[in-house]
């Protein structure tokens, strides 16, 4: 009968622990997950979070790949996996049925922590939040993820803090859901939501102004405009229009509250941008809208380098857990890169961290097996075992 190999706790990676350090002050604030029966949990919330941070950081391609590593890699077995190990069924049950409240609480606390540490790149332009949706390819068994006939997709609605380069708030729906209603929930009074044409909605513009929430939103060029007051434009400016207006045809679809409309040309393309920001120059309004692309860059980087959309869950609960863990990993990287390099997150620094963790585990001293309680026959087996 083969001997059980004890976990070598001397395998360590100080850099991995440093990455997770911001969580130390958060865990005491998080409600504990209780077992539903008499048996203890096979995977605690901290185990679950550790495993998913490891999944995103190390670019695993599937849940099967992650479980295989947690079972066979010495460092992962000792410092990431639950103490008694983990099976695919236990992992799936944990991801799809438990921990959502805790993951959301960790994300919100970590977002506040990052917000207090990271510099504000465009502070003079105010609190800017880019808002956009991102489709997630799903499988036909995900009945809740309606999109179109023969196709399933989920949609992530995200607010992204442009100043600090970090995610701020999120919602998950089926792929068909309208993005516009989430604007009110994503931005707070005093913040400016920065949006593309898909978010044009005249009643929403009125409501945002009533709620003291600002917006910078590109609109369709053929939108009806009623000019109330024109503003002067510099002769050499790329701006060709700046006025206080009402948008839409007279009637129910016309805005009730006046707003500002700025028209400008970049690379032979005319842009029309509606905003409630009368405190900015027309050129600054154009700059704010250009910064909307920060969220596009974030989505592309996040999906490519942290493997966030490689599905390891099928339920809406499980997919939300997976997305939150990907955002938590990104926030941890943002704090790490700021504290270690005084830089924003980049793939260069993430690759350096991955290599550093790998080298640290290779350099960990080996620990000989304790043989005091092994009988003579088993000692012989050990001595003749193949390497």
Image (cartoon, rainbow, N blue to C red):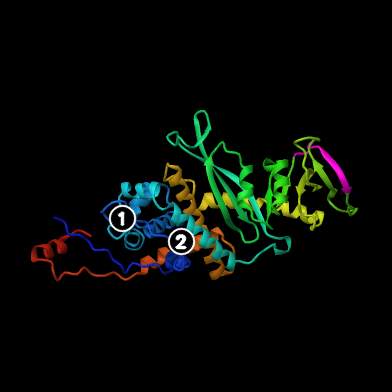
Dot 2 lies on which element? Answer: helix
First-in-chain label (1 vs 2): 1
Query: Could you tell me residue 172's position as x and y percent?
Result: 52, 45
> Does 58 appear in magenta?
no
Segment colored magenta:
220-229
Q: Is residue 59 visible?
A: no
What distance separates the C-alpha of mark 1 from that of mark 2? 30 Å
| Badge 1: residue crowd in 10 Å (few <14, some 14–19, many ≥20) | some
The residue tagged 1 is 41
- x and y percent of residue 130 in the render? 65, 52
Q: Is residue 31 visible?
A: yes
Quadrant of the drawing holding the C terminus: bottom left
For marks 1 and 2, give the one nearer the viewer. 1
What x and y, as percent, mark residue 204?
A: 69, 44
Q: Position of residue 121 (x, y in %)?
A: 67, 63
- Among the 4 quarters of the image, the one containing residue 148: top right
Q: What residue is shown with label 2?
A: 354
Q: Going by the image, does 161 lie left or right of 308?
A: right
């Amino acid at each position: 009968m083969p001997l059980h190999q004890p976990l070598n706790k001397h395998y360590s990676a100080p850099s991995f622990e440093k990455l997770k350090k911001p969580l130390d002050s958060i865990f005491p604030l998080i409600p504990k997950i209780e077992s539903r029966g008499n048996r203890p949990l096979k995977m605690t919330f901290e185990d679950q979070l550790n495993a998913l941070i490891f999944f995103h950081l190390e670019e695993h391609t599937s849940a099967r790949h992650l479980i295989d590593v947690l079972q066979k890699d010495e460092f992962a077995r000792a410092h990431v996996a639950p103490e008694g190990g983990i099976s695919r069924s236990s992992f799936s049950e944990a991801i799809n049925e438990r921990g959502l409240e805790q993951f959301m609480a960790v994300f919100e606390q970590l977002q506040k922590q990052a917000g207090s540490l990271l510099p504000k790149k465009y502070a003079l332009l105010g609190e800017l939040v880019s808002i956009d949706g991102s489709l997630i390819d799903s499988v036909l068994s995900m009945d809740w993820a309606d999109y179109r006939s023969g196709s399933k997709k989920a949609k992530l609605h995200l607010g992204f803090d442009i100043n600090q380069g970090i995610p701020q708030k999120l919602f998950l729906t089926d792929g068909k859901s309208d993005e516009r209603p989430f604007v009110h929930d994503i931005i707070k009074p005093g913040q400016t939501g920065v949006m593309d044409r898909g978010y044009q909605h005249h009643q929403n513009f009125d409501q945002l102004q009533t709620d003291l929430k600002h917006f910078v939103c590109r609109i369709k060029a053929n939108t009806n405009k009623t000019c109330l007051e024109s503003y002067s434009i510099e002769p050499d400016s790329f701006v060709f229009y700046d006025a206080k207006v009402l948008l839409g045809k007279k009637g129910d679809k016309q805005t009730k509250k006046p707003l500002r409309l700025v028209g400008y040309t970049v690379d032979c393309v005319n842009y029309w941008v509606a905003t409630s920001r009368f405190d900015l120059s027309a050129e600054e309004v154009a700059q704010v809208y250009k910064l909307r692309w920060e969220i596009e860059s974030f989505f592309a980087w996040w999906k490519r380098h942290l493997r966030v959309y490689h599905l390891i869950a099928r339920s809406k609960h499980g997919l939300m857990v997976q997305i939150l863990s990907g955002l938590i990993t990104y926030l941890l990287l943002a704090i790490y890169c700021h504290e270690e390099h005084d830089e924003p997150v980049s793939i260069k620094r993430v690759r350096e961290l991955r290599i550093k963790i790998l080298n640290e585990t290779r350099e960990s001293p080996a620990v000989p097996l304790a043989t005091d309680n092994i009988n003579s026959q088993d000692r012989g087996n050990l001595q003749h075992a193949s390497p």
